[in-house]
Each structure stands twice: as C-alpha cells, then as structure tokens.
Amino acid sequence: MIQTFLRRLYFVAVALFLAAPLIVVAGVSVNEKQDLAFPPKGFSLAWYAQIFVDPEWRKALFASLSLAVTAAALAVAIALPLAWFLWRRIAPWANVFQILGLAPFILPPVITALGMLSFWATSGFYGQPWTAVISHAIFFVTLPLVTLSLGFASIDRSLVEAAATMGADDRTVLKTVVLPLIRPYLVSGYAFAFVLSLNEYIVAYMTIGFTLETLPIKIFNALRYGYTPTMASVSVFFVAVAALVFGLIAKFGDIRRLLGAMSSET
Amino acid sequence: MKREAPKSLADYSPLFFPGLMLIVFFVVPFSTMIAVSFFQRDPSGFYTPDFVFSNYARFLSLFFGKVLGFSLVLAVMVAICCVVIAFPFTYLLTKRPRKVQTIWLVCLLSVLSLSEVIIGFAWSTLFTRTAGITNLFVAIGLMKEPVALTPSFWAVLTGMVYQALPYTILVLYPALVRLDPTLLEAARTLGASPVRAFMNVVVPALRNTIVATLIMVFVFALGSYLLPQILGRPSHWTLSVLITDQAIYQSNMPFAAAMAVFLVLMSLALVGLTLLVGRKENAL
C-alpha cells in the first residue's frame, strides 16, 4: 500500500520535472500582451497565429520543414541500402560503414557541426541551403540505420527462402517480401530523423546560420535580443509535433521494441 | 535465401551510395577538421594551410585548464544525478503495464527530441522573476518575494539534467526490461523486501550497465553546447560552448578544431571504455 503510494509519488515527481518548463512555456504563450508572465494575464492565441502570419517566422517555419523533410528522406536513402546489404551479405569489413553511420550521433554534436563547417568552407559551398540537408542527413543517418537494422533482424529468413525457392530473384524478393515487412521500421526511422532535424540547432547554425534561419536558429537569435511570446508558442508547437509523431509511431508500430524491449515477451 | 558472401561487383552495388555519402560527407569533413587544427589562423578570412602545433599549445593555458576542469566536473555531476534518478524510475517503469510504458516512452522521446534552444528557453522562463517558479514558492509561503534563479550554476545543472534524463532512461530501458524476472522472484521468495531485493539483487546484477550508462550520459553531457550559455555565466561555459564560440564569434577555426579533436579523443576513449565494460557483462 505505502509502496504503491511511494511509487506514484516518484512517477509524479519525474513527470512534474519533465513537464514543468513546458507548462510554464505553454502558459506564457497565451499571454494577451507581450508579457513574460505566468500565470498568463488574459488569454490569446494570437502568438500561435503569429507563427504562420508573421513573414519572418513563416519563413523560418518553411525553412525548417523543408530541411527536415528532405534531410530525413536522404538519411533513409543512405541507411536503407546499407542496412539491407549488411543483412543480406556476409562482409565483415562492411561493418566499417555501420560504425561510420553511428559515429556522428554518438560523438558530441559540436564535432559534427565543426567538421561540416570546415568542409563546406574549404569546398566553397558554405551557406548554400542544400549543404544543411546533406549535413543533417549524415548527422541523423544513425536513426534510420538503427531502426532498419532492427527491422531486418526481425524478418523470418525462412519467408525469404520460401520466396527464393519459388523462383523469385533478389529484386522480386526485396519488393514483395522484404520491403513490406520492414515498412514500419522505415517509417519510424524517417519520423525520428524528421523530428530531430526539425529541432536541430548547432549543425544547421554552423552550415547555413548566416544565410538562412531555421526555427531553432530563429528562436535563439530572438532570445539574444529579448523576449517575444512567439518563441513560447513555437516551442509549444515543437513539443506538439514531436508528441504527435511519436504517438503515431506508438499507435501503428511497437515503440517498446524500437527502444530495445524484445517483441516476444508480452 | 541465406546470408552469403558477395561474389561479383554487382553484389556490392547497394553499398555504393551509402559508402560514397558517408566517406565524402563524414570521413572527409572529419579529416578536414583534423587538418584545420594544424592550420594557421588568418584574421581576415578563415585560415591558411600550415602545419603548426600552436593551436594545441594553447591547451596549456590556465584558462583552458579551468574550462576543461569545469566541463568534466559538470558532466560527471549530470551523469550521477541522471542515473540516480533514472535507474529506480526505469526499473519501476518496466514493471508497469505495456500501455503505461508506451505512454511514458512517447513523452520521454518528445522531451528528448526537443532542441537545446527550446530547453534553454523553457528553463530560463521557469527561472525568471516574473513568470518563474519562485512565484509559486511565494504563493505557498516559502519565499517572501520572487527572484530570478538564472544565471547560476544550479540553473545550468538543472537544465542539463533535464536534457539528459530522458536519454538516460532510454539507455537503461533495454537492459532493465530484459532483466530476468526470476532473479527478483527468488529474492522475494527468500523473504527480501522489494526495496532490499532491488538494492541487493537488481543493482549488483546490472552494475556494468550502470557504469556504461554513466559514461554514456557523461559523453552526452559533454556535448551540451547551449544550456551553459543560456542559463549560466561565462564562467560556466563548457568545452562545447567554447568550441562554438571560437568557431563562430571569434572566427578562430584552427583553435576550435584543435579543441574539437581533443573532445573527440576524449569521447572516443570513453565510448571504447563503455564497449569494454559491456563486453565484460556479456562474458559473465
């Protein structure tokens, strides 16, 4: 009895810690005037409209979304053939590429950012919008690579063998058996990369920071010159997008398995 | 279809695109950065090719020593706080129904994916005088009047624990969810209270996981580049902040690159240590 109570208390404490700053930001975002006040004075959703109405914020929103959509697609395009090859073939040295795919994510982000900055500056493309797409794709390739590796590992090889015995060649097997089976992992890999790219600051800042503003860059720049409630409403918008995407993954996929729990146990 | 070794060049074709991308856009930039760390700074532009050790020699200054020492102490504190909070939490979470677990995982992922900019902004708001948490303390009578809690060391620490906590939980989750439940049952059958069973059975059984998680969170915390800047004073800046500052605002790329190389070596050494610890665990 007392133990259940203590456990609840613990869970509530962790939940409060995680939610507190977001609650305050959400509260601040509905202030009627340009105040930094909590509890909010008055109620207004104008600051949310601001994201889409104000040309500067809308531009940043559009830049962020197009960056995230394309970078995540490129990350999946890099990860899919690699994960497929590693699953299909016995080639120990090819694991080098897997390590290369995992490294950008494990190392402190500043390092990837600085590497990209020196690379784009040296090659003369510094500041071009597409450099951020490639940089993000490399930075986040880890996520689709991990989800896809999990996906391939979950395929029952006898299914593939059955198809091959019936005369299907590699391409047909890939199209009719393998791809449908790993589709959920493909989608979640894309979604993870998309959400993280949307939120990413340092790599974007070091590649295109001086020519184009993404939303996180815009928030940071605004933060340095003072406070506007739009920063709060954009932050809430970000939390909502992340919760929506991960909620969808949980609904249509097995998020516990993606995060390392075994699928066999119930 | 069994796994087979590639025979012809065509069998290698799926590797072409990923291999090319990773080499051109990760290995080459990384090498460029290492090369730049030996270059001479050019005040008018970026840098001029050279081979000097002066960028590394700057590490020997007292200022750099202080920043490095502070970064390490801060990251150790973040790692310890996170694991102490996250380990019992994750353990209890794995005992909850699947649905509860899923909801928590979605929330944790949402917080984890948040930009450092947003985390920094959110905590700086929570720590302000006008909208901050001290207003709540005033309302319940703990404090006389609201105060600003930032910039301060504790604000930096809190922000970084906030950032790293979901990461810690998600790193611990697989190990704890796969923990053999019979271990605990045996302890309970023999009369141990749940708390005692947890302390004397679960914690020792996962000792290596705990060490590995501490190191991983430590490396994660070393990478934090904005929170010390938003929530702290310049004396609270870490190595990552200093690298960003040198690269962008002081336009001293060679020095920034040298520090980054140093940070890579340190992180790699630690990640290697984690793998070693993990291997020992598997051998047991």
Image (cartoon, coloured by chain):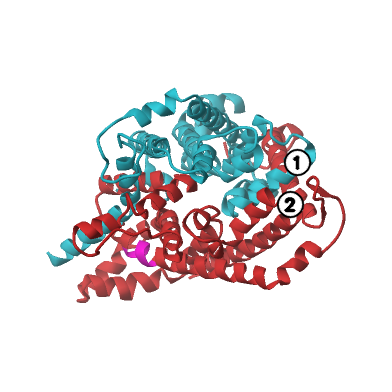
Q: Position of residue A18 (x, y in %)?
A: 34, 52
Kindly check if marks 1 and 2 are in contact, taking CB atoms under 8 A apart as contact.
Answer: yes
Residue positioned 67% across, 37% down in the render: B18
The chain letter for the residue carrying disc 2 is B
Residue located 62% across and 47% down the image: A98
Magenta: predominant secondary structure element?
Answer: helix
Q: Is residue B276 left or right of residue A260?
A: right
User: Which tint is chain A?
Assistant: cyan
| Image location (x, y in percent) of residue A49 | 37, 26
| Marks 1/2 same chain | no
Relative to A173, residue B149 above or below? below
- Residue under the point 45% across and 36% down: A188
Residue lying furthest right in this view? B50
Among the 4 quarters of the image, the one containing residue B37: bottom right
Residue A80 figure quarter: top right
Query: In this structure image, what is the colour of chain B?
Result: red
C-alpha distance separating marks 1 and 2: 10 Å
Residue A176 in sight: yes
Is B131 placed above or below A228 here? Answer: below
Q: Secondary structure at mark 2?
A: helix
Q: Which residue is mark 1?
A: A121
Read off the magenta span: B84-88
- Residue bearing the label numbered 2: B253
Disc 2 residue type (three-letter)? Met
